[in-house]
Amino acid sequence: MTGTLKKPQGDTATRRPRVMPDVTKAIASDIFSGRYPAGSSLPTENELGVEYGVSRTVIREALKVLAAKGLVLSRPRVGTIVCNEDDWNIIDPQVLAWHAPHALDDKLFDAILETRRAIEPLVAELAATRATLQEIADLEAAWRGMAGAGEDLAAFSRSDIAFHQIVYAASHNPIFRQIGNLIDAGLKFSLEATAVISLDRRMEAVAAHREVVEALRMRDAEAARGAANKILDLAARDLVSAKKLKSN
Amino acid sequence: MTGTLKKPQGDTATRRPRVMPDVTKAIASDIFSGRYPAGSSLPTENELGVEYGVSRTVIREALKVLAAKGLVLSRPRVGTIVCNEDDWNIIDPQVLAWHAPHALDDKLFDAILETRRAIEPLVAELAATRATLQEIADLEAAWRGMAGAGEDLAAFSRSDIAFHQIVYAASHNPIFRQIGNLIDAGLKFSLEATAVISLDRRMEAVAAHREVVEALRMRDAEAARGAANKILDLAARDLVSAKKLKSN
DNA sequence: ATGTACCTTAATTATCATACAAGATCAATT
DNA sequence: AATTGATCTTGTATGATAATTAAGGTACAT
C-alpha cells in the first residue's frame, strides 16, 4: 500500500545528471560555433580542465561522449581533433539539439523537412494499420490539446509534438520511432525559430491533424498518407513564411 | 587546405581505438543478449572492473558511452540501470551493429527494409537533381565493382554498400547521409545473414543499379525513384527467401 | 498503537589528484 | 634517407573524497 506513492512522471528519458553534461555541452557548442573548426585540435585535456575548472577525469568523460557521437577523435600524442562534419552523428537527438542553435542558416530546417516528407506519409500509413486502440485514444487526446490550446502557443507546441511522437510510435517500427524523437528535437527549435504562427494557420493545422486521427480510426492507410502530406504542406508553408520574416 | 591529404582507405568504419571499446562492446552485448534486461541494475562499477579486468576508470568511460547512446542510466546510490528498449538509440550505427547479432528474430530486418522503402526513393530523386559529376563518376565506379565481382561475394557486398553510400551522400542532405550509414550497418549483417544470393539474382541487382546510374546521369528524378523502388523489390524478395531458408 | 515527519546512515556514483604506461610525432644523428 | 631517441599527449591505474539519495530509524502527533 505504501508503495503506490509512485511519482506520475513516467518519462524515464528525461533524467538529468548533474554537472558533467554542462561541460560536454559547452565543448560541443564550441565546436558547433566554429571556435574549434573541423580538423582542428582541441586544447589538451589538462588545458580544457583548467579552462572549465574541472578535473581531467570530467574532461575525459565528456570527450568520450563527444567521440561516441562522432564529433571528435582522440589519439595518443596527437590530441583530440574535431571530426569532419560528415562524420558527426547529426541524427542523434542530443547532437541535433546542440547543433540547432548554431545552425544560423536554414539548411538544417530544410533537411529536416525533407526527412519528414520521406518518412511521415509511410509512418502514417503504417500507423493506420498497426495502431492500438490505446494509441488512437492517446492521439485524440493530444489532438484535443492542440485544438483547445487557443492562444497558448507553448501548450499548442507541446501537444503538436506529442501528437507526432504518438504517430511515430504507432508505426511500431523502432527505427521510425527513434527518427521521430529526432524530428521532434528539430521541431522544438523550428517552433521557436518560426516565431509566431497565426491563429487561423494553427486552426488549419488542427483540421489536418484531425484527419489523421480519423484515418487511423478508420484504418484507412491511404487517407492517413494524404493527411500526413497535408500537414507537411502546411509545415512547408510556415517555414517559407518564417524565412521571409527573418530576411526582413 | 593543406590538411587534405586524403588516405585511400575510404572506409571510416574500420577505426580501431585500443582496448576500451572492447569493454564497451562487451557490456553492450551483455545488455542485448538479455543478461542484463531492461530495468535491471548492472553490477557496481567496481564489480564490473574486476569482472573485465580493468580499472574503474575504463568502466566509467565505457558506461558513459553507453549512457550517451541511451542504453543505460547511472545515478548515485542507485547504480546503473538498463534503460527501456524504447529509449535506446537504435539509429546509432554502432548500437545497431552491437544489437544486430542478438536480434534473432527478423523484426529488425523488416524495420530496416521499411525505412529504406520510405527514404531511398526520395533520396534517389534528390540525388538525380543534386549529384555532382564526381559523385556520378564514383557511383559508376562502384557499379563496375558490383558488375565485375563475379563469384567474389565479399567484393560484391563491398561495392553494393559503397554504391548506396554514394547515393545517400549525393542527396546532399546530412540527415539522409547519416541514415545511409545506419542502413549500411544493417546491410552488412543482412548480407551475412541472408547467406548466399544466387548469381542470377545478383545480376538482376546489377541491372537495377545500372538504372540508377543512368537516371542520375540523365537528371531524371522520376526514373531514379523507379529504379530505387526496383532495387527495394529485389531486396525484399531476397529477404523473404532468406527467411524461408532459415526456417527450414 | 499507528502513521507521519524528520533525521541518520550507508551505498553508489561523481569528482579529484597523482602517477605511470603506451603510442605517435618530430628532430637530431648517423 | 633511414634510424633512433626524446618528448608530448592520451590511455590506464589507484586511492581518496564529495555528492546524492534510498532505506531505515526515531521522535512525535494522532
Image: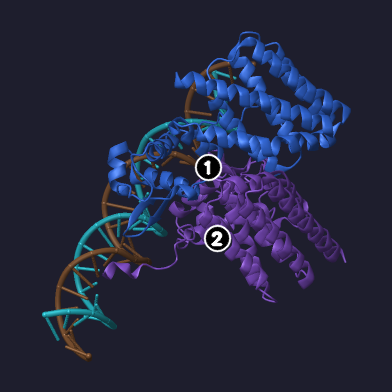
Chain colours: A purple, B blue, C cyan, D brown
Q: Are marks 1 and 2 on the same chain?
A: no
Q: Secondary structure at mark 1?
A: loop
Q: Residue at x 80, y 30 (%)?
A: B224
Q: Residue furthest front?
A: A218
- Residue B226 appearing in the image: yes
Q: Which of the chains bears the disc numbered 1?
A: B
Q: On the rendered image, what quadrant is the N terminus of chain B found in? A: top right
The three-letter amino acid code for the residue at tag 1 is: Ile
> Badge 2 is on which residue?
A137
Q: Position of residue A92 (x, y in %)?
A: 59, 48
Q: On the rendered image, what quadrant is the C terminus of chain B found in? A: top left
User: In the displayed structure, does residue B222 sit left or right of residue B238?
Assistant: right
Using the image as rendered, state which of residue A119 and residue D8 is in the foreground.
A119
User: In the displayed structure, does residue B180 sit left or right of residue A132?
Assistant: right
Using the image as rendered, state which of residue A89 and residue A215 is in the foreground.
A215
Nearer the viewer's eye, disc 1 or disc 2?
Answer: 2
Q: Secondary structure at mark 2?
A: helix
Q: Position of residue C19 (x, y in %)?
A: 34, 45
The three-letter amino acid code for the residue at tag 2 is: Ala
> Badge 1 is on which residue?
B90
Q: Residue furthest top?
A: B151
Name which quarter of the figure residue A144 lies in: bottom right
